[in-house]
Image (cartoon, rainbow, N blue to C red):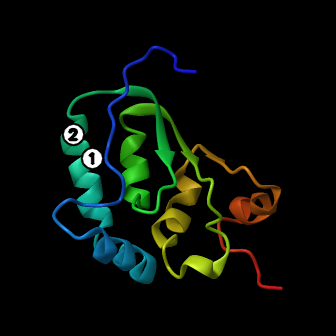
Amino acid sequence: MRSGLSTPGFPSTRCRSFPSGITDAWVVRTGALGLGKFVENWMFRQIGDETFDVVFVDHGELVDPSCVRRFKTISNVVVNYNQDNPYVAQDMRKWRLFLKALPDYDLAVTPRGSSVAPAKKGRRAARP
């Protein structure tokens, strides 16, 4: 259900100037090395002078700690919702920026109970 509020949308992790296979592979293998500041600057050019009650980050593999802190300058609350499991090593380094930024979010939401403990610790779960 929508609240009736207008929300600006941003594209997914795929940059049109790069083939998505290369961009996706770079994010997974390097943890978006070199992309964090680029993404932050691009988003804030799109946002301009707008402010928000809540900034909602879906997944967040391209959002670094600096960007989350900057979101806090234009909103009251910054929330992350991640339906993936960034706390296991299956995606190589894909979640590097997310895990670094996790302590800066006001709220991090996960749909699985097994992710709660590692989320509270802000790191990957220990391997069995």
Residue 59 position in % (x across, y down): 52, 54
Rate crowding at label 2 as few (under 14), some (14 to 19) or many (20 or more) other CA atoms within 10 Å.
few
Residue placed under numbered mark 2 in the picture = 46
Q: Residue at x 77, y 55 (%)?
A: 112
Q: In the picture, residue 114 is in which quadrant?
A: bottom right
Q: Give the quarter of the figure containing the N terminus.
A: top right
Residue type, label 1 = Met
Q: In the image, 113: left or right of 81? A: right
120 or 110, which is in the foreground? 110
Residue placed under numbered mark 1 in the picture = 43
Q: In the image, 46: left or right of 88? A: left
Q: Residue at x 41, y 58 (%)?
A: 63
Residue 82 position in % (x across, y down): 59, 53
Q: Secondary structure at mark 2?
A: helix
Q: In the rendered structure, are the residues bearing label 1 and label 2 in contact, judged by CB atoms less than 8 Å apart?
A: yes
* Above or below for 74 versus 5: below
Instruction: Single out the residue that lies furthest toward the left.
Output: 17
Q: Secondary structure at mark 1?
A: helix
Q: Residue at x 35, y 78 (%)?
A: 26
Q: Residue at x 51, y 67 (%)?
A: 100
* Above or below for 58 versus 38: above
Residue 23 position in % (x across, y down): 31, 72
How many numbered dots are placed on residues in this image?
2
* Above or below for 115 versus 92: above
What is the distance, in whole Å, between disc 1 and disc 2 at their CAs?
5 Å
Q: In the image, 90: left or right of 15? A: right
Residue type, label 2 = Gln
Instruction: Single out the residue that lies furthest toward the top.
Output: 4
